[in-house]
Image (cartoon, grey):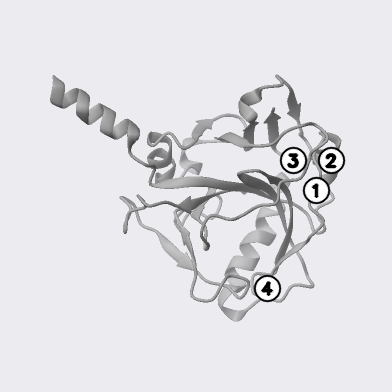
């Protein structure tokens, strides 16, 4: 009995294999959908991020421990020959309203407990905009282009400059992704959920359910139809 209890305590206190970093949604060029976030009381960071080689750009809502990102195809950002397929994937995702693709991505950071290999296949991407010698480790199989994108960041834990948002929100505390079918969730989803990192459910449509500050203000903003997002703060 004592041995079993010690094993449970060790499992609870063990560091997670990855840590939640941020979430993104693919939107239309120029991210006019940012207006929905601004209406909900968020300040958009002034810097536009260009992903050279990938053909995309993005704007962000910066938080103390992560960020929310609106990513979009940008014809002014170059596409490398190695990433033409990836650039096309983001173009397709930007039309999620009509083609059923998943516009949502969840990104994790490595921790001291990140394993060398996972109990499912992964693959790696490098691009010009990343730091030299780094890569993104993709946890969603190539063969599931319409599934939610799960990945591990190319960099160490990102230092963010948290803005003072008019609605008072500060920290990212929970994420949940709703998929239109169980088949739209990659094998990595059950692994991530089993570690208590976030939740995945099946519903009628794609949805990113975000909780900030553990919902301390008891406010919920539904950003649909502009964005497939619910935010609680």
| Residue 157 visible (yes or no) | yes
The local crowd at label 4, few if under 14, some if 14 to 19, many if 20 or more residues have their Cα within 10 Å, is: some
Q: Report which residue position mark 3 lands on.
A: 227
Q: Is residue 43 left or right of residue 196?
A: right
- In x, y percent, where is residue 221? 75, 28
Q: Decide: marks 2, 1 in contact (CB < 8 A)?
A: yes
The local crowd at label 3, few if under 14, some if 14 to 19, many if 20 or more residues have their Cα within 10 Å, is: many
Q: Dividing the image into 4 quarters, which one contains the N terminus?
A: top left
- Front-lying residue, 190 or 6: 6
Question: Looking at the picture, does residue 90 appear above or below residue 37?
Answer: below
The local crowd at label 2, few if under 14, some if 14 to 19, many if 20 or more residues have their Cα within 10 Å, is: some
The tag on residue 52 is 4
Separation of disc 2 and disc 4 at Cα? 27 Å
Going from the N terminus, do you reach mark 3 or mark 2 first? 2
Question: Looking at the picture, does residue 97 appear above or below residue 125?
Answer: above
Q: Decide: marks 3, 2 in contact (CB < 8 A)?
A: no
Separation of disc 1 and disc 4 at Cα? 21 Å
Q: Decide: marks 3, 1 in contact (CB < 8 A)?
A: no
Question: Looking at the picture, does residue 225 appear above or below residue 220?
Answer: below
Q: Dividing the image into 4 quarters, which one contains the C terminus?
A: top right
| Residue 102 visible (yes or no) | no
The tag on residue 38 is 2
The tag on residue 95 is none
């Amino acid at each position: 009995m004592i041995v079993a209890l010690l094993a449970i305590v060790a499992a609870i206190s063990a560091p997670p294999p990855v840590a939640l970093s941020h979430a993104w949604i693919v939107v239309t060029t120029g991210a006019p959908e940012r207006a929905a976030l601004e209406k909900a009381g968020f300040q958009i960071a002034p810097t536009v991020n260009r992903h050279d080689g990938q053909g995309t750009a993005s704007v962000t809502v910066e938080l103390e421990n992560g960020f929310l990102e609106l990513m979009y195809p940008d014809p002014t950002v170059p596409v490398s020959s190695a990433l033409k397929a990836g650039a096309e994937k983001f173009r397709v995702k930007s039309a999620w309203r009509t083609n059923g693709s998943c516009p949502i991505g969840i990104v994790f950071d490595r921790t001291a407990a990140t394993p060398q290999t996972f109990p499912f296949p992964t693959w790696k991407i490098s691009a010009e905009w990343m730091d030299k010698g780094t890569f993104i480790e993709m946890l969603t199989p190539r063969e599931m282009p319409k599934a939610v994108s799960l990945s591990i960041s190319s960099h160490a834990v990102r230092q963010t400059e948290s803005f003072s948002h008019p609605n008072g929100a500060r920290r990212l505390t929970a994420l949940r992704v709703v998929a239109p079918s169980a088949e739209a969730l990659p094998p990595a989803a059950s692994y991530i959920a089993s570690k208590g990192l976030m939740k995945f459910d099946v519903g009628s449509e794609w949805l990113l359910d975000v909780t900030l500050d553990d919902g301390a203000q008891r406010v919920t903003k539904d950003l649909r139809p502009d964005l497939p997002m619910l935010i609680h703060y």
